[in-house]
Amino acid sequence: IITTAGNNKTALPTMQETDTLFEFKVNSDSMEWERWVAPTWEYPSTVDDPDFSSMLVPTVETTRASYILSNLHRKRKGALMTGSSGTAKTSTALMFFDSVQNTNEAMRIKKICFSSATTPFMTQ
């Protein structure tokens, strides 16, 4: 562990053998390392017939990605999400758009579905 000059604070978090640095973030208030934690999700008990296909349950990975998207959005920077199929890119984007729409910020969202059969001429 690397220590900073002049005090006993460590520059890196205390990690277990199976941890990576990506499991941690710096708390902007206390400037201390803390683990990423998914927000508490509550089952929509007020809905009589819930649509399970549209329920988005946040995970640690989607929480991390949403945090990065929020910071990029706040600075008016673009983002491109890439990854293998099944890595929650669409779910993360939808959760992020839901959070933006719940603010006073005006934003229009247009979803375009691509697949392996999509050609450049189809999107122009």
Image (cartoon, rainbow, N blue to C red):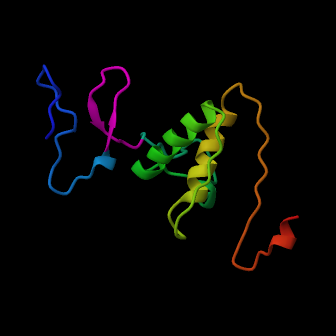
Residue 90, placed above or below residue 105: below
Indicate the quadrant where residue 46 lies: top right
Q: Quadrant of the C terminus?
A: bottom right
- Residue 34, percent from left and from top: 28, 35
Q: Nearer the viewer, residue 1 or 44?
A: 1
Question: What percent of the width, then of the height, locates residue 88?
Answer: 53, 60
- Which one is nearer the viewer's eye here, 87 or 76? 76
Q: Is residue 112 left or right of residue 98?
A: right
Instruction: Residue 79: give x, y in percent of width and height.
Output: 62, 48
Which image quadrant: the N terminus? top left
The residue at 55%/45% (across/down) is 44
Q: Which residues are magenta?
A: 24-38
Mark count: 0
Q: Quadrant of residue 36?
A: top left
Residue 68: percent from the left, percent from the top?
Answer: 51, 41
Q: Nearer the viewer, residue 101 or 112?
A: 112
Is 2 situated above or below 112?
above
| Observer-nearest of 35 and 20 | 20
Position above or below: 90 against 9:
below
Query: What residue is shown at x 61% (from left), y 31% (from top)?
Result: 75
Check if residue 3 falls in the magenta segment. no
Q: Magenta region, mostly helix, strand or loop?
A: loop
Toward the front, the furthest residue is 5
Q: Residue at x 75, y 80 (%)?
A: 117
Residue drawn at x 65%, y 35% as measured from the top left: 100
